[in-house]
Amino acid sequence: MSKDTTNQTAEALFEKALSIAEKHLDEAIKEGGPLGPYIAVAMIEAAVNAAVDETSHEDVIDMLRDLAAQIEADADEADED
C-alpha cells in the first residue's frame, strides 16, 4: 500500500470518526441546554483523556498542536474577511 493510499485511508477513517463524534456532541449539547458550552469543553477534556489512554501523551500533544494551528489559521482567515 502506498503512502498516499495509507494517508487517504487514515483521513477517511478520521472523517468518519469526526462525524460520529459531532453527532454525539450535538446530542449532548441539546441535552445540556444552557450547559451546552460547558459540555462542549468538557467533551474536549474527556476526549483528550481517552486519547491519552488509547495512544500516548506525545501523540495527543502532537494532535492538539496540529488542531491549534488549524484553529489559528481559521481565525486568521476570518480576520482577513
Image (tube, rainbow, N blue to C red):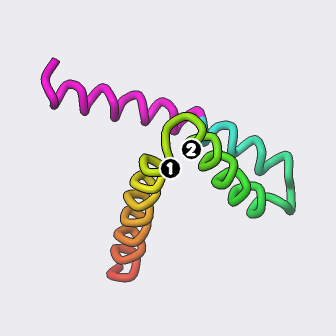
Residue 23, magenta (yes or no)? no
For the residue marked with disc 1, what is the amino acid?
A: His
The residue depicted at 70 percent of the width and 45 percent of the height is 26
Residue 78 image position (x, y, % from top left): 40, 75
Q: Are marks 1 and 2 in contact (CB under 8 Å)?
A: yes
The answer to whether residue 50 is left or right of residue 79 is right
Q: Which of the labelled discs sits on residue 57, or is there none?
A: 1
Residue 38 image position (x, y, % from top left): 77, 62
The answer to whether residue 44 is left or right of residue 18 is right
Q: Which residues are magenta?
A: 1-20
Q: Residues within 10 Å of mark 2 (few under 14, many from 20)?
A: some
Residue 29 image position (x, y, % from top left): 77, 51
Residue 51 vs 45, above or below: the answer is above
The answer to whether residue 40 is left or right of residue 66 is right
What quarter of the picture does the N terminus occupy? top left
What residue occupies the far top of the structure in this picture?
1
